[in-house]
């Protein structure tokens, strides 16, 4: 076993060691138990007093969603106008211009929905002010929104019969002050001490070893990078994200950032078990997620360390693996592992160019985002997994001839219809918009957009199709990474992906909370010898099969036109 592969294994195991106690801690925070961060109580009380909020007020699922959607709408308007007029505001030492309306529309939505899809380059597309009080701010609150929504689901599962899913404002604030902020301070300090910039100075002039004079962008990047990883946000301070040597200076920071990507999503799975006192259920969910995650990691590491078959045909040795689009200081295995971690968690940051992945690896990361439930985005990953659970419960009930039940509540037509609609919606958004984009390229290549459709793709044929498929898959999964051969900063892509971003974020939050609200309000049915145990590994296998079948039926033809066809064309 090479040291590169051993490094990825150690990173994953260390993440597990940190995630379990963090999950226990988060369960205590939201249960109102004593924790080490109780010193934040005065700050939280001040926030609630200024805002006029009673954090102990109970909310049903409709009130919870109303509060969540209202504040998110205000954040969207705020972000849009700040980005539009950023050139008129202070803290702009490099003189960067304001964003165009369509780009500001896309950027504001992207960071609001925890996607961080970037149709601009961080150094030149934003100012220090908007990087901090728009981008970094949204990275905190969008992650906290996802956690708050998940805790509402926990409350519905915890009680036998209830209308109370908790208080959105309470969970939003505590997610920020007790979880995201303390962890971000730790990660930011590590990055700063390893060379990530923290100054407010403008570009610096340096002379390279080759004797070239270049301008290097700087800025207070460390804090933003910390929350972009911990909150599964993923937006880079610099254009090439964590492939940039200032954003990710060395192998140690690469390990820290990788752990940060996975830490909270995995910890929330354990938090489920502690919070509702069903640890076996959490272990089953974790096992299913980890099974697919490990398979995807194994595939990507194998193909990226094996090398590019097109180069093999030339008889050139590839001892370091397929290194196109990757950092030599990190290696092929670290990039392959990151590619699965970042797409499994809806993080979207990159430490190498996904556009340069081999066809199989590129297909795996697209498939990973299509599933969108392997750990998933902070909070939202488990919400997506809950949809698969409802479908699995329904089909299991049909197989044994019993009324489907989950956690003591009957799963009836309304709940199943909502789950089915959300599952179908994702496939419709991804394939429908990809088909529209492909149609524009083929039939209207010279139409007068800001960038003509014929110029969207830097790669022809199968890989060009994969670039468009990846963009909408990433948008729907609120991931944010991309195959960067696609020219996406134009009206068509900014508007169309903005629509997918909104629908892909909020409908998969609204649906599980609506299902949970309906289930929690029903009469509790005690377990009997005939009850389907959803905390068994048998049911875990059933859920795994449902995930595989639904994903294959929904997306295999699209994958066949892109990465699968590209694979066979090369081999």
Image (cartoon, grey):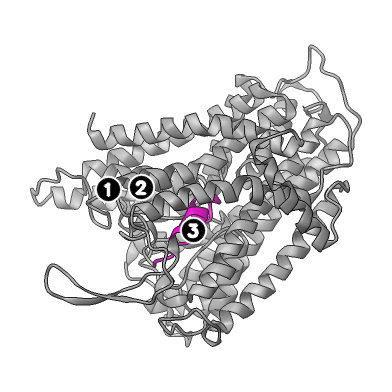
253 or 10: nearer the viewer: 253
Counting from the top left corner in percent of width and height, residue 538 is at 61, 20
Mark in front: 3 vs 1: 3
Query: Element type at marker 1?
Result: loop
Per the rendering, the mark at residue 55 is none
**What secondary structure is marked by label 3?**
helix
Q: Nearer the viewer, mark 2 or mark 3?
A: 3
Residue 404 visible in rendering? yes
Provide the secondary structure element on which disc 2 rests: helix
| Residue drawn at point x = 9 percent, y = 49 percent | 316
Q: Give the CA distance from mark 3 to mark 1.
A: 22 Å
Give the left or right position of residue 222, taking residue 156 as reference: left
Residue 158 occupies quadrant: top right
The residue where tag 3 is placed is 223
In the image, residue 245 lies at what x, y percent?
30, 59
Q: Which residue is mark 1?
A: 330
Q: In the image, 56: left or right of 488?
A: right
**Are there few (<14), some (14-19), or many (20+) residues within 10 Å of tag 2?**
many
Marks 2 and 1, the one that precedes in the sequence: 2
Give x and y (percent) for residue 343: 47, 48
The residue most toward the right is 523
**In the orientation shown, which residue stands out farthest toward the left?**
315
Q: CA distance from mark 2 to mark 3?
A: 16 Å
Is 537 positioned to the left or the right of 42 in the image? left
Magenta span of residues: 222-238
Q: Residue at x 54, y 43 (%)?
A: 551
Residue 420 is at least partly visible in this image:
no
Q: Which residue is mark 2?
A: 254
Q: What is the x, y in percent for residue 357?
A: 32, 52
Label 2 – label 1 distance at C-alpha = 8 Å
- Drawn side of residue 412 relative to residue 467, left or right: right
């Amino acid at each position: 076993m090479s040291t590169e592969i051993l490094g990825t294994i150690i990173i994953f195991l260390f993440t597990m060691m940190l995630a379990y106690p963090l999950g226990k801690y988060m369960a205590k925070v939201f249960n109102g138990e004593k924790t080490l961060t109780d010193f934040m109580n005065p700050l939280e009380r001040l926030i609630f007093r200024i805002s006029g909020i009673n954090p102990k007020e109970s909310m049903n699922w409709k009130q919870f969603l109303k509060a969540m959607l209202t504040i998110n709408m205000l954040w969207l308007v705020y972000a849009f106008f700040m980005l539009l007029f950023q050139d008129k505001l202070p803290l702009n030492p490099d003189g960067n211009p304001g964003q165009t309306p369509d780009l500001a529309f896309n950027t504001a939505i992207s960071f609001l929905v925890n996607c961080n899809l970037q149709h601009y380059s961080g150094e030149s597309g934003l100012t220090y002010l908007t990087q901090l009080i728009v981008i970094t701010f949204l990275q905190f609150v969008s992650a906290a929104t996802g956690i708050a929504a998940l805790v509402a689901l926990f409350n519905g599962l915890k009680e036998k019969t209830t209308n109370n899913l908790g208080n959105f404002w309470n969970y939003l604030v505590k997610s920020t002050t007790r979880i995201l902020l303390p962890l971000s301070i730790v990660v930011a300090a590590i990055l700063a001490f390893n060379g990530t910039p923290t100054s407010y100075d403008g570009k610096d002039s340096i002379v390279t070893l080759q004797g070239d004079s270049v301008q290097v962008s700087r800025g207070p990047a460390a804090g933003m990078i910390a929350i972009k990883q911990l909150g599964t946000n993923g937006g880079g301070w610099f254009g090439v994200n964590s492939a940039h040597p200032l954003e990710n200076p060395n192998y140690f920071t690469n390990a820290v950032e990788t752990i940060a990507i996975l830490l909270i999503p995995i910890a929330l799975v354990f938090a489920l078990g502690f919070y509702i006192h069903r640890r076996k259920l959490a272990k089953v969910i974790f096992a299913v997620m980890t099974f697919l995650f490990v398979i995807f990691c194994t595939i990507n590491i194998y193909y990226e360390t094996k090398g590019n078959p097109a180069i093999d045909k030339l008889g050139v040795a590839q001892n370091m693996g397929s290194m196109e689009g990757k950092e030599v200081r990190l290696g092929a295995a670290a990039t392959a592992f990151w590619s699965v971690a970042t797409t499994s968690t809806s993080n979207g940051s990159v430490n190498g160019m996904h556009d340069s992945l081999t066809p199989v690896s590129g297909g795996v990361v697209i498939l990973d985002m299509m599933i969108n439930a392997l750990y998933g985005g902070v909070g939202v990953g488990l919400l997506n997994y809950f949809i698969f659970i409802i479908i699995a419960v329904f089909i299991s009930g049909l197989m044994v001839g019993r009324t489907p039940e989950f956690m003591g509540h009957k799963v009836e037509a309304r709940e199943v219809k909502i789950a089915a609609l959300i599952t179908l919606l994702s496939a419709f958004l991804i394939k429908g918009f990809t088909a529209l984009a492909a149609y524009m390229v083929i039939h209207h290549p010279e139409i007068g957009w800001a960038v003509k459709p014929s110029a969207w793709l830097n790669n022809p044929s199968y890989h060009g199709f994969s670039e468009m498929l990846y963009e909408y898959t990433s948008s729907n999964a609120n991931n944010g990474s991309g195959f960067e051969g696609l020219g996406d900063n134009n009206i068509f892509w900014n508007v169309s992906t903005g629509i997918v971003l909104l629908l892909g974020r909020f409908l998969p939050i609204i649906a599980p909370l609506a299902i949970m609200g309906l289930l929690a309000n029903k009469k509790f049915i005690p377990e009997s010898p005939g009850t389907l145990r959803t905390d068994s590994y048998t049911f875990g296998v059933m859920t795994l099969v449902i995930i595989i079948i639904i994903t294959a039926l929904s997306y295999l033809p699209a994958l066949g036109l892109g990465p699968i066809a590209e694979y066979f064309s090369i081999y």
